Amino acid sequence: MASSSVSFIIIIITTVLLPSLSSQLSDLFPSNNPPPFLGKHSHPIKQPNHHQQYHYETRYFSQPLDHFSFLDLPRFRQLYLINTEHWVGPSRSGPIFLYCGNEGDIEWFAVNTGFVWDIAPRFGAMILFPEHRYYGDSMPFGSKEEAYRNATTLSYLTAEQALADFAVLITNLKKNLSAEGCPVVLFGGSYGGMLAAWMRLKYPHIAIGALASSAPILQFEDIVPPETFYNIVSNSFKRESSSCFDTIKNSWNALTSEGQKEDGLKQLSKTFHLCQELTSVQGLSDWLDSAYSYLAMVNYPYPSNFLMPLPGHPIREVCKKIDGSPAGSSILEHIFNGVSVYYNYTGEVDCFQLDDDPHGMDGWNWQACTEMVMPMSSDRNTSMFPAYDWDYSAFREGCQEDFQVTPRPRWITTEFGGHDIEHVLKSFGSNIIFSNGLLDPWSGGSVLKNISETIIALITKEGAHHIDLRASSTEDPDWLVEQRATEIKLIQGWIDNYRKKMKATFEI
């Protein structure tokens, strides 16, 4: 029997219900329930012929475990992908396009970042995809089991160490290729976009610019309202159908009520075609929340196979199924018909597995419990999700229980900035593109206006999660074609200015 192993993405949040809500909802959205990032959808590319249009060589680089101490610690092998097919070389200052690896297998991100591959030939660029430490095959201590053993072994999993990995790798590679004069342009989407922006700020002497797509660098304490993410998800459904929005909003009570009945969990398992019988409502609640959030992220205007095989405008199709369910269907049957567009659009799945543990020893869960603390909540008036407030105390307790660590919610903004971002970027930053589609729920945590002549925000009303980094297609709408053309023009400007400065310096 076919099954769908469901992945829940990777930003940890903590939640607590508003006191005025019914106690029936008290089991939904508990502390540390994670909303979506992309890493757990990433997977090794095992098929040798997969995405043959992208050719690359797989290499490894020996990295220090700790870039910020002088202890004699074991090193580890960092995997990276390289393509020099179109690189014009050091003699012509051929650029190097470096994608900042996300929280997952780098090959999955490489084959889903077609924009870099599409534009490399016109720039004569080398392509480099380094993998993020503690993900994929880039495991310290020899294996994932050892790397994830405890808080001591995981303590080297930080954004700062990852950026240092990228900096050391590209510096070493350029030296070995006698390419010290070749400009480096950074790319990244989602968490990778955050890393690209931060690397440009932290290592301006190493990279001349960064395209940070769907990069929520402001999704931290006291910067953006914590309800922003779920408000955007909810609005994406409401704009398609207010009745669809209302059905989803009312379904959480129905879900909890059904689960409290005798044999209610058995009936829910049957209604939602689960492979194993539920032991609580929470797993199903997470499964539904995950589907709605991912749908908002990949609400692309054309069919895609990024997270799941989906039609174009998938939220529209979900709402058609919810609103168009047969007369006499229960509210939960309406919901199942809708989410089946996400989990089973191909019709090949007979039953669904709810086997992901959000409290498991996952790399991103560790990062979210240490420095990547992103407050989130759900507003009872504007959200279609159960209402809850951000509760740092509960979040901290969950992290102490899961990892024996205490989060540092202010560290990221101390290390990279975030508060008063306009002044900071205008004073100390340059050559960063923040691209966002307003349908993407992470757009609310990104930079949405131009900061200076060189810190540019490219906003598309109908865009979703880093759609600009996807490969070009004949189905691309005009606004997406125009957005990419603007990005290419800006990147070309960075490279031209760099070469002019290098030429002037050489002539002196």
Image (cartoon, grey):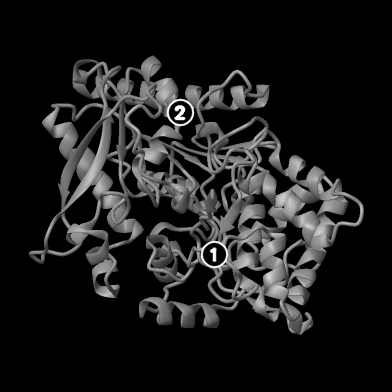
Task: Look at mark 1 in the image and give the residue it sits on.
Answer: 34
Q: Secondary structure at mark 1?
A: loop
Compared with 486, 420 (above or below) is below
Place residue 13 in its image quadrant. bottom right
| Whether residue 67 is visible | no
Q: Position of residue 100 (x, y in %)?
A: 36, 43
What residue do we see at 30% from left, 53% from top? 162
Residue 114 got which mark?
2
Asked if residue 406 lies left or right of residue 96, the reply is right
**Circle 2 residues within 10 Å: few <14, some 14–19, many ≥20:** some
Residues at badges 2 and 1 in contact (C-beta under 8 Å)? no
Q: Residue at x 49, y 50 (%)?
A: 38
Name the spot of residue 505 as percent of width and height, x first: 23, 24
Which residue occupies the extreme front position in the image? 1
Is the residue 204 above or below the residue 259 in the image?
above
Residue lying at the far right in this picture: please name it: 327
